[in-house]
Amino acid sequence: MGKKWISRKGNFFVSIFFELKKTLPDFKEFSLINPLIIKKILNEYSTFKVKIKWPNDLLIRSKKVCGILQELIQFEKRNFLIIGIGINTLHCPISKTFEATSLLECSNKLIDNSEILNNLKKNYETIFCNYKFNKKLLKKIL
């Protein structure tokens, strides 16, 4: 894809890798689901409203706090999805192309990256467990 993370040590970075099966949302649905899940999580920490800059950035006070990359790969006739998530929890990168902020700046408290990871895991597990049961439930969750 040619994209790269620009951030400093101490921030939150994770790649989620899984096989896309018929019981899960498809690639396009995940491009909608991912920012909604992360927005929900970031709103728990920020004292300011989190907004989505579609399709893959999250902003607080018009400054980038999170970026999402999503890529579909095929291996042995099976589809796999890789979701890369980077959240500025402690620091924000210095960039000439966009203004950035961090959760620390927007909450005045240190954010535990493992807490974000657990919250993220819980949200994805909820979708994975319930999606095959009822697609409409996905809308209620988000």
Image (tube, rainbow, N blue to C red):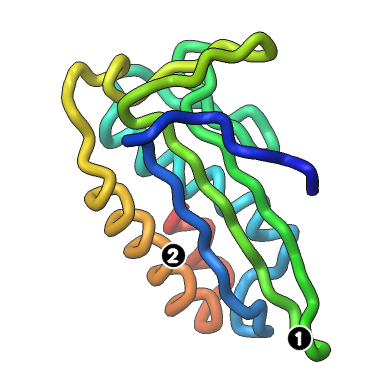
Residue farthest front in this picture: 9
Report crowding for label 1: few under 14, some 14 to 19, many 20 or more residues within 10 A (C-alpha).
few
**Residue at the bottom extreme of this rendering:** 76
Residue 19, position as x, y percentages in the image: 63, 80
> At 47% across and 68% down in the image, what residue appears?
127
Vertical placement of residue 34 versus 130, above or below: above
**x, y (%) of residue 77?**
82, 89
Q: In this view, does 95 lie above or below 90?
A: above
**89 and 33: which one is in front?**
89
Q: Residue 93's x, y, as percent?
A: 49, 20
Residue occupying the point 44% across, 20% down: 92
Query: Which residue is more in the foreground, 116 or 124?
Result: 116
- Above or below residue 11? Residue 72 is below
Residue at the extreme left: 109
Quadrant housing residue 141: bottom left
Amino acid at pointer 2: Tyr
Q: Distance between the residues labelled 2 and 1?
A: 21 Å
Q: How crowded is mark 2: few (under 14 residues within 10 Å), some or many (20 or more)?
A: some
Residue 96 on image: x %, y %:
66, 9
Q: Which of 94 and 37 is in front in this view?
A: 94
The image quadrant of residue 80 is: bottom right
Count of numbered marks: 2
Say which residue appears at 53% left-offset and 75% top-offset.
131
Determine which residue is flagged by label 1: 78
Q: Which amino acid does label 1 sit on?
A: Arg
Q: Is 126 on the left or on the right of 112, as rendered?
A: right
Sequence-wise, the earlier of marks 2 and 1 is 1
SS class of the residue under badge 1?
A: strand
List the residue tagged with mark 2: 124
Left or right of residue 54, residue 120 in this image: left
